[in-house]
Amino acid sequence: MKRIKISDLFASAKIGEEVLVKGWVRTFRSNRFIALNDGSTINNIQAVVDFEKEDESQLKRITTGSAISIVGEVVESQGKGQDIEIVVKSFDVIGDAHPDEYPLQPKKHSLEFLRENAHLRFRTNTFSAVSRIRHNMIFAVHKFFNDKGFYNVHTPIITGSDAEGAGEMFRVTTLDLNNVPKTDEGNIDTKQDFFGKEANLTVSGQLEAELAALALGQVYTFGPTFRAENSNTTRHLAEFWMIEPEVAFNDLNDNMDLAEEMLKYCVQYALDNCKEDLDFLSSRLIEEEKGKPQDQQSMELIEKLKMVVDNDFVRLTYTEAIDILRNCKPNKKGKFQYKIEGWGADLQSEHERYLVEKEFKKPVILTNYPANIKAFYMRQDDELPEAKPGMEVGTTVSAMDILFPGIGEIVGGSQREERLDVLKQKIADFNIPEDHVWWYLDTRKFGTVPHAGFGLGFERLMLFVTGMTNIRDVIPFPRTPKNAEF
């Protein structure tokens, strides 16, 4: 007999049908009721065993975490919460899980405890739901771009450039760290290293994606990226996944349109294809927040997702946002941790969330940031969106950030600087040696065109869609300072 997945069993099984199911035991009650799950759905199938007819020594092996195979008849369920159950005709214990040793007993476990047991946390309802949604979001991203005629490009994970100019990169080397070769000047002799130069794990595939876009028209990357930030927060990882489209002939407005369309598509895909898992996570979130004051409780998860799909994103310039923030009550009354004094301030998460959650109550796209707080590759504005004292042409760039409720920045992007002379000056201003990015400059010499793109941190999207509050809980094996377990 061929095994049937539990999700298919709920969808298509007929009363009286004999089936074979395999999975892991969630609970075994009264020596009679087995709750079995095989990972295909949030829902367990109940299997009812006649303990009087079974070998007692085999029944004792049915413990939480053990893997079993069951042959039985599908019947209408007598209990609440399920339409069908299985009357067991025979069972076989495939793999034991000793109850004194198995960490995930049927009780509530903290998320911190589950991170310490990340090799097993897939087996919990919460993390199986997150994992299934993660798969669906990966598929949605690829489907969105494929259906729009984009080409997926694999950009290098090991790179000799720093796309962000941040310098927070992981070094890749084969040099003997106990006997590092030095030059006559006493510096590390990188010529003796594997690549003959300094190499690092990538912080972004953007620069290489631009090269492809300036030949293929529209491309996207979806790969791992790495930041060596010593940041122990609920929003940062040392290893995470980035989605980075680049489109030739697009300007800033085209870029905003594409990003908004993509985000709405992915959220709608989750609503259409992950209903049971989202309902479970929504109930979990409501339960978690019961003790909080009303004004500190998050929006209900499904409602929050629909808010993104059903609303046009608000678009305003950085300058307009600064005016709103400088004059808002939390800023005037000192409620912000970082007070907004005036134009040029680097917006923090608290400011971004105020704009989304309090001022507009919908997603916000901020544009035209000060050049000195943005990356070198962003296009220098020819005209100011609105003039302020001390501002002049060249002080802002055609950048955009998309801000989401509960998250803050979820997307960062820009029109790219296509003019060779301006780009060379910006590279000099950022103290980036030209010989490090000679290949990037070449694209501005040979058929340069306006183009634009953005980066979406996939785990930020996952935080939003699942309602989880810690980024370590939306990636299977989080990499953070002092933690590279599993």
Image: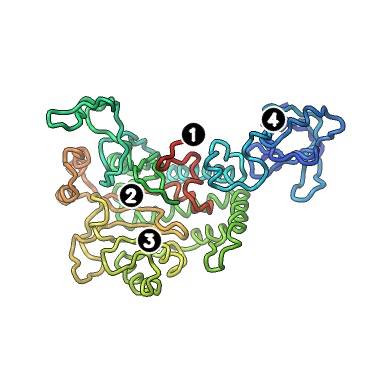
Q: Are marks 1 and 3 in contact (CB under 8 Å)?
A: no
Q: Which residue is mark 4?
A: 3
Task: Count the labels in the image.
Answer: 4
Left or right side of 179 for 461 = right
Q: What amino acid type is highlighted by mark number 4?
A: Arg
Rendered view: 318 above or below 144: below
Of the image marks 1 and 4, the number of the one nearer the N terminus? 4
| Residue 275 visible, this orientation | yes
Q: Decide which of 50, 380 is in the foreground and name it.
A: 50
| Residue at the right extreme, as displayed | 52
How far apart marks 1 and 3 lie (CA) works out to: 38 Å
Q: What amino acid type is highlighted by mark number 1?
A: Phe
Q: Decide which of 8, 69 is in the foreground and name it.
A: 69
How far apart marks 4 and 3 lie (CA) works out to: 49 Å
Of the image marks 1 and 2, the number of the one nearer the N terminus? 2
Q: Decide which of 240, 154 is in the foreground and name it.
A: 240
Measuring from the top left, give residue 161's x and y in whole percent: 25, 39
Measuring from the top left, give residue 386's x and y in whole percent: 25, 69
Q: Quadrant of residue 290?
A: bottom right
Q: Are marks 1 and 4 in contact (CB under 8 Å)?
A: no
Q: Which residue is mark 2?
A: 453
Q: Residues within 10 Å of mark 2 (few under 14, many from 20)?
A: many
Q: Nearer the viewer, mark 1 or mark 3?
A: 1
Which element carries disc 1, helix, strand or loop?
A: loop
Of the image marks 1 and 3, the number of the one nearer the N terminus? 3
Q: Which residue is mark 3?
A: 365
Q: Which residue is mark 1?
A: 486
